[in-house]
Amino acid sequence: MNLRGLQCFIVLAEELNFSRAAERLHIAQPALSQQIRALEERLGSQLVDRGSRPLRLTEAGSYFYTEARQILDHCEQATQGVRAIDAGTHGWLSVGFTRSAMYSVLPPALKAFHAAYPKVELKLFEMLTEEQADALRDARIHIGIGRQAPERPGCTRRILLHERVMAVLPVDHALAARDSVRVDDLATSPLIVYPKHPAAQFPRFIATLYRDAGITPIVGHEAYEIQTAIALVAAGLGVTYVGESVARHGRADVVCKHLTGPGASQITSLTASFREDDSSPHLQAFLACLPNEAHADSAL
């Protein structure tokens, strides 16, 4: 069954006259009759009562007319959708992101992308940086934005932001009034570690801070995500560390302090990872909305 045959039948059903239908279709009347007979043979049912005057559809023909119209409408919608996707005006983009990206690079990128491509559906998935590798591999996301993201086979990694790390202390901490703190000043304060994941990179980064300061951290609690860690600090259960972009969106029951001394020069990064073979035009458009490495040092 071909679309041309369906189109011929629909026009005949609307005109109920072979001559007028053939004229609308710009074909000869015998060619139209041949198309209709071929369609009836394919379906094994008579669609048109040729003996009636005026011409009328059989019961099966009336049913098939409704179905054929829907089929052609769906085909037209699909055709327009394909053309729109090729043109980059329609489609979808799936983004995996770690919570801290929402404090810096992600909101302006989403705003710019949505303004430029309002008909592209954005699918957003909050996930740990360490969970993004599987999501990229399985094509569940087009791009993953994470902190301290490692190199991944088959993926390109692009640095979006470099920033200093800040210590987060309870407001009643003994060092809360200082302008800055040393990591070794916090040696006796329990450390709130996040994210709680066996392959998490950020805890390793914090461990480097303590190693550079020549001390071993006292791990008090482990949290799954950044706001939980900060809430535990507010409760007086220890201290934690965040990037400057997170610190700028702080809360009243904690204080954030720059680091001095050993480890103060350590920076953390937000990166975008995406599959090397992903040819999605919307991925490329979204990448254009993100900061690039040339501007990555602006936070320093």
Image: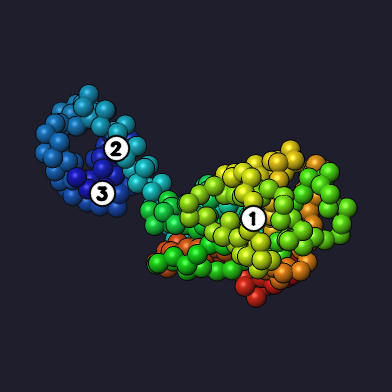
x and y percentages locating residue 206 in the rendered image: 63, 59
Image position of 217 with respect to 253: above or below: below
268 relative position to 83: left or right: right
Q: Which residue is mark 2?
A: 68
Q: Check disc 1 and report the residue beneath it.
A: 217
Residue nearest the observer in this picture, 51 or 149: 149
Q: Give the label, 1 or 3, closer to the camera.
A: 1
Instruction: State the residue lying farthest toward the top.
Output: 59
**Residue 214, percent from left and from top:** 66, 66
Q: Is residue 158 visible?
A: yes
The three-letter code of the residue at mark 3 reads: Arg
Residue on which disc 3 sits: 4
Quarter-wise, where is residue 86 in the image? bottom left
Q: Quadrant of the C terminus?
A: bottom right
Q: CA distance from mark 1 to mark 3?
A: 74 Å
Quarter residue 292 falls in: bottom right
Asked which secondary structure carries label 3, the reply is helix
Residue 277 versus residue 90 in the image, above or below: below
Q: Assess disc 2: are there few (<14), some (14-19) or many (≥20) residues with their C-alpha within 10 Å of its C-alpha.
A: some
The residues tagged by marks 2 and 3 sit, at their Cα atoms, a distance apart of 11 Å
- The residue type indicated by label 2 comes to Ala
Residue drawn where x is 48% and y is 51% of the image: 198
- Circle 3 crowding by C-alpha within 10 Å: few under 14, some 14–19, many from 20: few
Instruction: Please report contact status of discs 1 and 3: CB closer than 8 Å, yes or no.
Output: no
Residue occupying image coordinates x 60% and y 60%: 207
